[in-house]
Every structure is written in structure tokens, then in C-alpha cells.
Image (spheres, grey):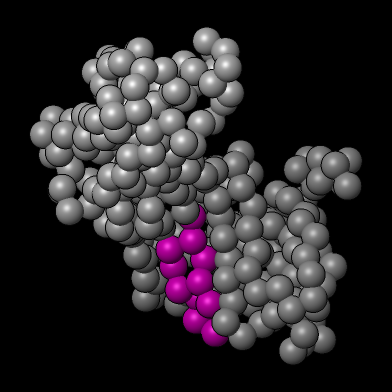
């Protein structure tokens, strides 16, 4: 398969007879979605569905075609680069061949190949999807038009440059460790908590931040109650006061030494148990 794909990257492939779908050249529409968490450059393709370039935080750059009416029969989808229709060149440059399943309705390539497709489009060529559909004896071919691309490309590229570097999975969980009988936050803990706060401010889907305080089994139980509470509250106060996270998003709980993450029989284990655990929920 790798050799076959490499072959396609080097040579032009001829087009089989296909039912071709593309946006109207006189009325090509674009939509750009810009946010710190996601960038999308999309185009409706009349009679077929939609084509888009997209990238989200923590994800790779992708080219995605989605059909609403032409499921695949199975086999392979072909991602190709076509010259502009007015050039009357019927051959296409093969970009990738991707296995597909029966009834599949979304087709994508990612990473370097998707970026190559975008570069070709900026140069006036048409990224194209080709596959065999259930409803037709001939192949389905969907073209991504370049008409009026220059009106939308600057905003899309600016969004990509400003995309937030951390994903939800990157900040979803954090454990902060404390010194013996202390609830003071170290500098590294503050950096990590600030990163969580920065993400929460741009993701409206975040519903709650839970903070659980723990201790080891060192010291008197009465003091450990206060200490586990103080550790959770020190994190809450930092998020609210220093990072301006809304207080109503935060819940706290205090567990003393009763839920150790490591054994309390060793010094190293007790160091792991002097902690607070933070989890972000959508």
C-alpha cells in the first residue's frame, strides 16, 4: 500500500467516468470558523455535502469531505489534485489512497497530506475526492473549488497561528504536591494552574473544576483534617484570586489520609500522598 501511494504521488492518474459535484463557480461560498480552540475553512458542495480544512487544539491538520447523500460502497477513496476546470485538463495528480468501509459518509486525510492539499488549492488547483458510491454505477467525484478563496484564507491562517497550544486532554487532570505539613503552592504548581485557568476562560463547555485535598498519615488526625482542607482551598483561592476563574465553577472536598495514592509506609509514598487533585469537567 505504501508503495502504491508513493507511486501516486509521483505520477498523474487518469480519471474514471464519474458523477462530479462541485460548488457553483459563479457562487462559491466559504465559511471560516475562528476560535482559540478550532479553525475551520469549509465550503458547501451542492448535491454532495461539504468539504473543509480543519484543525483543533491537540489535533492534526485535516482535510475532510462529508456527504449527506452518497455513501460509499467500500474499497478505497482517492484524494487527488485537479487543475481548474477552465484549463480543460482531465488528468489529476494522485495525493493519497485511503481504505473505506461500506456506507462510509466521511472521508479524510491528515497532517502533511492535508497541508499539501491546501497548498495546491492556494496555487489555483482543486483538491478532489473520488470513490465509488452505492447509488451510482459510476464513481462519485467531489471538487473543492478555489473561487473567492483569497477572501477567506487570511482569516483562516490567522486563526491557525493563534490556535491555543493545549487541548482539553492536556489540562483535564493535574496533581499538585505539597511539602510536609504545608499548603503553600510552589512556582511550578502555579504555572500549571494558570494553564488550566487560561484554557477554562476560552472553552465555554467547561462546567466544573473539582479540587480534592489529601494528606499522608503523618501527624495528628485533627490537624490532617485542617491540612487537607487548606491544600484544596489554596488551589481554589489561587484560581479565583490570581487567575480570575469564576468561583461558582469550583467545588472542593477534603479526604485527609484515607485515600492514599501510594503507600504511607515509605517516605517516598508519603510524599505522593501530600497532594491535591484537580479535574476539569465539560
**Direction from residue 185 to residue 111 in the image, left or right:** right
The segment highlighted magenta reads 42-53
What main secondary structure does the magenta stretch of the protein show? Answer: strand
Is 43 part of what is drawn in magenta? yes
Residue lying furthest top in this view?
267
Q: In which quarter of the image is residue 100?
A: bottom right
View extreme (bottom): residue: 135
Indicate left or right for 27 with 138 as reference: left
- Locate the C terminus by quadrant: bottom left
Q: Residue at x 58, y 66 (%)?
A: 65
The number of numbered badges drawn on the structure is: 0
- Residue 277: within the magenta? no
Q: Residue at 18%, 43% (x, y): give it.
A: 245
Q: Quick check: 95 left or right of 127?
A: right
59 relative to 138 in the view: left or right: left
In percent of width and height, residue 232 lies at 28, 34
Amino acid at each position: 500500500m505504501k508503495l502504491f501511494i508513493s507511486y501516486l504521488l509521483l505520477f498523474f492518474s487518469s480519471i474514471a467516468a464519474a458523477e462530479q459535484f462541485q460548488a457553483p463557480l459563479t457562487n462559491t461560498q466559504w465559511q471560516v470558523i475562528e476560535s482559540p480552540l478550532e479553525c475551520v475553512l469549509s465550503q458547501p458542495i451542492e448535491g454532495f455535502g461539504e468539504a473543509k480544512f480543519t484543525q483543533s487544539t491537540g489535533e492534526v491538520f485535516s482535510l475532510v469531505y462529508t456527504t449527506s447523500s452518497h455513501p460509499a460502497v467500500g474499497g478505497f477513496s482517492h484524494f487527488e489534485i485537479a487543475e481548474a476546470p477552465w484549463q480543460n485538463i482531465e488528468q489529476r495528480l494522485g495525493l493519497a489512497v485511503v481504505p473505506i468501509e461500506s456506507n462510509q459518509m466521511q472521508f479524510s486525510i491528515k497532517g502533511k497530506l492535508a497541508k499539501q492539499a491546501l497548498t495546491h488549492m492556494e496555487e489555483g488547483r482543486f483538491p478532489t475526492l473520488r470513490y465509488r458510491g452505492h447509488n451510482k454505477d459510476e464513481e462519485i467525484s467531489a471538487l473543492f473549488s478555489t473561487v473567492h478563496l483569497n477572501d477567506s484564507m487570511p482569516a483562516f491562517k490567522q486563526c491557525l497561528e493563534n490556535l491555543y497550544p493545549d487541548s482539553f486532554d492536556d489540562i483535564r487532570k493535574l496533581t499538585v504536591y505539597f511539602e510536609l505539613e504545608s499548603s503553600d503552592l510552589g512556582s511550578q504548581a502555579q504555572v500549571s494552574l494558570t494553564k488550566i485557568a487560561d484554557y477554562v476562560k476560552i472553552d465555554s463547555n467547561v462546567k466544573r473544576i473539582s479540587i480534592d485535598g489529601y494528606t499522608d498519615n503523618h501527624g495528628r488526625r485533627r490537624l490532617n483534617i485542617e491540612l487537607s482542607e487548606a491544600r484544596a482551598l489554596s488551589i481554589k483561592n489561587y484560581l479565583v484570586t490570581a487567575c480570575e476563574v469564576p468561583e461558582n465553577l469550583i467545588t472542593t472536598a477534603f479526604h485527609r489520609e484515607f485515600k492514599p495514592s501510594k503507600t504511607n509506609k515509605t517516605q517516598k509514598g508519603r510524599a505522593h500522598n501530600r497532594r491535591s487533585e484537580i479535574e476539569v469537567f465539560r
